[in-house]
Image (cartoon, rainbow, N blue to C red):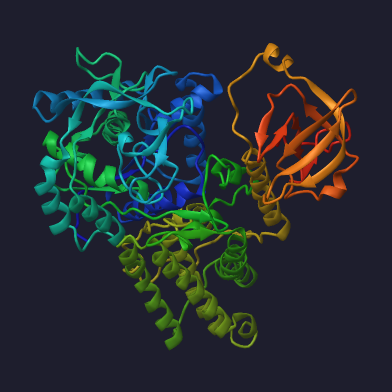
Amino acid sequence: MKDFKRYTITAALPYTNGPIHIGHLAGVYIPADIYARYLRLKNKDVLFVCGSDEHGVPITIKAKKEGVSPQDIVDRYHNMIKTSFEKFGIAFDYYGRTTSETHQKTASDFFKTLYDNDKFIEQTTEQLYDQEAQQFLADRFVTGTCPKCGHDEAYGDQCEKCGTSLNATDLINPKSAITGNKPTLKTTKHWFLPLDQYDDFLKEWIIKEHKYDWKPNVYGQCKSWIDEGLRPRAVTRDLDWGISVPLKDAEGKVLYVWFDAPIGYISATKEWAEQVGKNWKDYWKSDDTKLLHFIGKDNIVFHCIIFPCMLKAEGSFNLPDNVPANEFLNLEGQKLSTSKNWAVWLHEYLEDFPNQQDVLRYVLTANAPETKDNDFTWADFQARNNNELVAIYGNFINRVAVLTHKYYGGKVPQADDLQDIDQKTLQELKSFPEKIGQSIEKYRFREAQQKLMELARLGNKYLADEEPWKQFKTNPERTQNIMFVALQISTALAVLSEPFLPHTSKTLSDILRLKTLVVKLNWSNIAKHDVLLPTDHYIEKAGLLFSKIEDEQIQKQLNKLKQSKIDNESSSQDLTPQKEQITFDDFSKLDIRTGKIIKAEKMPKTKKLMTLKVDIGLEQRTIVSGIAEYFKAEEIIGKQVSVVINLKPIKLRGTLSEGMILMTENEKGKLVFVNSDVETPTGKTIA
C-alpha cells in the first residue's frame, strides 16, 4: 500500500428516519471502523468522519405520518444513532449532522461556487405532481415499477432491487407516497449537473485508473452506468425541508439530498478541525492525503459518479482513492426490511446482549457481504460465539492467565533454552501483523479476521500440544518456557484484535497491563520485538472474555422476528381496497333484511353462480349469488342470511336477480354468511 501522510475515511451518512440495524453495520460501519483502527495502530494520521443525513425525503414522510415536524424526527434519531454507535464501539473522530450551521453554509457555498462557474444547466421540465397534496413529488415521494427490472416497489430515485439510478418520471405506473394517488405532470425549473459532460473524465478515472484496485462489484456497476450513457442529474428539488437553494429566483426549492449529503463529510471535517486545532483542507485538498468512502452497494452511483463529478467541477478537492462498497446482508433468509420490522436493531441488541458488542462485530465480519449478499442467522451467531470466541480465543486466554497465577503468582516466567517448537511458534507469531494487515489493506476484512483467529488457534494448539499442566511438577523449566511463549501470543492477540474486537482488546490489554510497559506496542512493532511481555511483568487475574450464549437467548430473538412476521402479515392481508368515504345518509339508504334460503340450485353452464330463493317475510326474492365454488346447494337450504333488498335488479345469465346476499370471510379465510351467528369477520364482503 502506498504510504500517505494522511487518511480521510468516510462512512455513509445514515438517514435519521429510524435506528441502525445489522445491515448498516455489516455493509458500512464495521468495515470502516476496522480500517480506521488498523491505520491508527500503525501510527497513521487518520480522520474518520460520519454524521446524520437529516434532509432525506424519508424523514419528511415519517414526519407527516406521525404528525410532527421533520426537526423532531431528526433530533430523535440523531441522538439514538450517535449513542448506539458510541456504545457499540464505532470510533469516529467526529460525528456531525447536516442540519448544523456549518454544514448548511458549506453546502450552500459549494452550490454557489459551481453555479458561479457555470457548472450547472438550468432546465424547465415536467415533474410529477400530487394534485391533492399540492406538492411536487421528489424521489421517495414516488413509488412505481422499475423500467429496467420490473420491480414494483422502486423509488423515484433508485430501484433497490437492481440498483438502477432513476428519475421519478422513469417509473411505470407511478404512485404518490403521500396520498396514494396517480400523479400528474407539472412544469418546474431546476438546476442540473450535466453528468454527460464528465463522461471522458469518468472513463479515464474509473475505467482506466481503477479497473484493478476497485472491488469488482463497484467497478462493474460504475462501468455499466457509464456504458449506458449518463444524463444530467437535478441538484435541486421542490420541497419545504432541506437547505434552501442560495439563489434569488429559487423560492421553495432546496438542494437535492444527494448533492447535500456527501458534502456532510466536508462540513464534519471542518467542525472536527476547529475543535482540535487543525487545518481541514489538509484532509481534503492535499496530494499526500488518501480519501476513502465506505458505503453499501445502493450508494455506489452517488459516491463513484455524482459526488466525484461534483468534486471535479469544483476543482480543488481530492477524488476518492477507493470506494470499498459491500453487498446486502439478509436476515434469516429474507431481505432486511425496516418498514416490515424485519431487522436486528442495534439499540435493541445492546439492551438484549449487554457487554457483548464484540460478538456481533465478530459474527458480522465473519459473514460480511463483501462480494455477494450474505445471510445473518441467530443460529450462526450462537455457534460462532460458543464454538469460536468462547472455545478458542477465550479458552486460550483463560488458561494462560489462570496458569500464570497458579504457577508464578501472576508474573511472566523466565525463559531459557527455548526448544525448536518454542522458537518456531514465536517466529510464526511475528508473521501475523503483516498477514492480517495485507488483508485489511485489500478490504478483505472477513479474511483478515480469520487470520486473527489463526493466531488464537496457534496459541490453543501450542498449549494443548505442550501440556504445561502435566510438565509443571516433572519439568518446571520446560513449563516456564511454555508459559512465556503463551504469554507472548496473548500479548500479540491483545494488540492485533483491536480493529476487530475493540472491547475485548481493551479488556485483555488491561489484564496484561500493557499500558505499564516501557515500550508501547502497536501494529508495526509486534514483529520487531523478540519479547513483547518481559520476564517478571505482573498480569491481573482474568475473568471470562466471552460467555456462552444459551438457547433461551436465541429463542427470544427468533420469537421477536416471528412476531414481526405475524404483525406484518396481519397488516398486509389482501383486503378490498378502501373506497370513497360515504356519509351516514348514504348508508341509511340501504334496506337490509334478514331472510332464509328456501331453495338453491347451481346455474347451468357457470362456474360461480347459484340461483337462490330467499324468504324475507312478506315476500320471496330470487337472488343470483357468486358462491357456487364455496357451497353445495343442498347444504345452504335453511340458512339465515342478510339481504340488501333495495339494490336495483339486474339480469344475470337471463335470470333477474332481486337483491344481494351479504357474506364475509372469517379469521380462517372461510367464506360465511353475514347473520347473527357469523364468526369474527375479516371485513372482506362478498356478494
| Observer-nearest of 479 and 586 | 586
Left/right of residue 285 with respect to residue 599 in the rendered view: left
Residue shown at the point (42%, 70%) measured from the top left: 451
Q: Position of residue 605 (x, y in %)?
A: 67, 51
Quarter of image, res 578: top right
Residue 497 at least partly seen: yes
Eyeballing the image, is 285 above or below 42? Answer: above
Residue occupying the point 56% across, 47% down:
343
620 sits to left or right of 117: right
**330 above or below 318?**
below
- In front of the other: 247 or 392: 247
Q: Where's residue 265, x and y in %?
A: 29, 36
- Quarter of the image where the N terminus is located: bottom left
Q: Residue at x 66, y 61 (%)?
A: 548
Seen from the viewer's position, the closer of residues 662 and 207 is 662
Residue 29 lies left or right of residue 633; in this view the side is left
Q: What residue is rendered at 53% in x and 41% in y? A: 338
Q: How many marks?
A: 0
In this rendering, position of residue 644 left or right of residue 515: right
The residue most toward the front is 654
